[in-house]
Amino acid sequence: MQESPFYKVLPVLLCGLSVPLSMFMWIGNVAYSKIASDGENGVVPPTRWLFSVLVPVLLMVYGLRRKGVNRSGALLGLLCAIILSISSHAFLACLAAFFFSSSRATKFRGHLKRKIEEDFRDGGQRNWAQVICNAGMATQLALLYLLDCGYGERPIDFVHLYRSSWLGVGIMGAFACCNGDTWASELGTVIGSGDPFLITTRKRVPRGTNGAVSFAGLVASFLGGTLIGLVYFLTVRYTVEASVYERSPNQWPLIVFGGIAGLLGSLVDSLLGATLQYSGRTEEGFVVERPGKNVTHISGVRILDNHSVNLISCIITGIAMPSIAMNLWSVF
């Protein structure tokens, strides 16, 4: 199907609109700071507004053209990306790393996934519900970060910067959970020759069953989370002022805690999926999430769907990781 002329010029149009839109937001920010008596400390520089609008717009256009998201997912993702970027560029970097790597993982060996997933779609085509489940928790924490700590990149220091560190690790943990779970399900499903086992009973089950885990999937979840931790660490390393960074604790443990968050999120997701999410198998061999005629029950009860499981896992991991990092940071 040939692209329409309007769709071809859409990226240029959106990028052009980024300048007046960012200026409009900056003017609104200045006006609000005067009313709220925040002074200059409450004003986000216009260059930051421009960056925080232009880069998310480019990500949205890329996602649409690569069919990584549909229109509803792109619009909601744009809003989330702007909030994350205004708060801290490290948060936007985590979102970008999750989006690009998870999209590639979804497309990996798609011809094999088509045989076991009844509703398999090339590229994933994430919608607004999936954006909320994957980025909603992080965006809420980013809003708290912006309101409580202000904008800007800060190192992780639970002694001198407790609130920003707690929220920063929470956001990193939420994205690491999403990325680790995505890598585990998308890569673990098509890597290896044996069937996975159910996390609650250790019984062998068909690939694609909710709550099923494998060694390859667990490794993939740790690596997926590690990538988010690495991206967060590198962004902090090269955006925080050198004098501030040198006085801060070692930041490289972020990489390790990213991996822990990815693994933890995947395990929580699997536990919820094995118990509160229905899995059945059709006569054609597809694994489905709903009971029906000629569907053989495998595990779980029909209480939660895949979106709900992802959201709950993300919330649990995002809340748990700051406490885990705070208590174990001194070990490193």
Image (cartoon, rainbow, N blue to C red):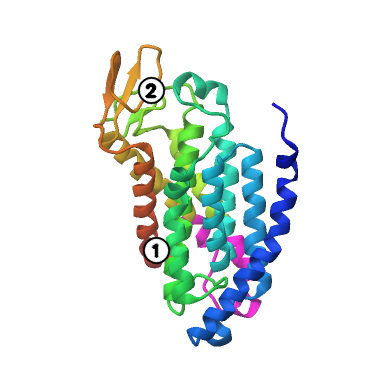
Q: Residue at x 41, y 27 (%)?
A: 208
Q: Main secondary structure of the magenta part?
A: helix
Residue range (magenta) = 233-257
Name the amino acid type tagged 2: Val
Q: Which residue is mark 2?
A: 287
Image quadrant in which you'd find residue 22: bottom right
Which tag, 1 or 2, sits closer to the chain's start?
2
Q: Is residue 108 left or right of residue 202?
A: right
Q: Position of residue 310 (x, y in %)?
A: 39, 44
Count of all numbered marks drawn on residues in the image: 2
Inspect this view and state whether residue 331 appears: no
Q: Residues within 10 Å of mark 2 (few under 14, many from 20)?
A: many
Residue at 71% x, 55% y: name it: 15
* 43 with respect to 174 (left or right): right
Q: Nearer the viewer, mark 1 or mark 2?
A: 2
The numbered mark at residue 41 is none
Return the x and y of residue 225 as percentages of the image width and height: 49, 49
| x and y, in percent, of residue 243 in the image | 63, 80
Query: Does dot 1 land on a helix, a strand or a loop?
Result: helix
Q: Nearer the viewer, residue 186 or 234?
A: 186
> In the rendered view, does 314 fall on the left or right side of 19?
left
The residue at the point 57 percent across, 26 percent down is: 109
Q: Calculate the distance from the C-alpha at mark 1 to the C-alpha at mark 2.
A: 36 Å
- Residue ID for mark 1: 322
Answer whether residue 239 is magenta in the image.
yes
Q: Is residue 239 above or below residue 66?
A: below
Give the answer, above or below, for where 328 lies relative to 117: below
- CB of mark 1 within 8 Å of CB of mark 2? no
Q: Residues within 10 Å of mark 1 (few under 14, many from 20)?
A: many
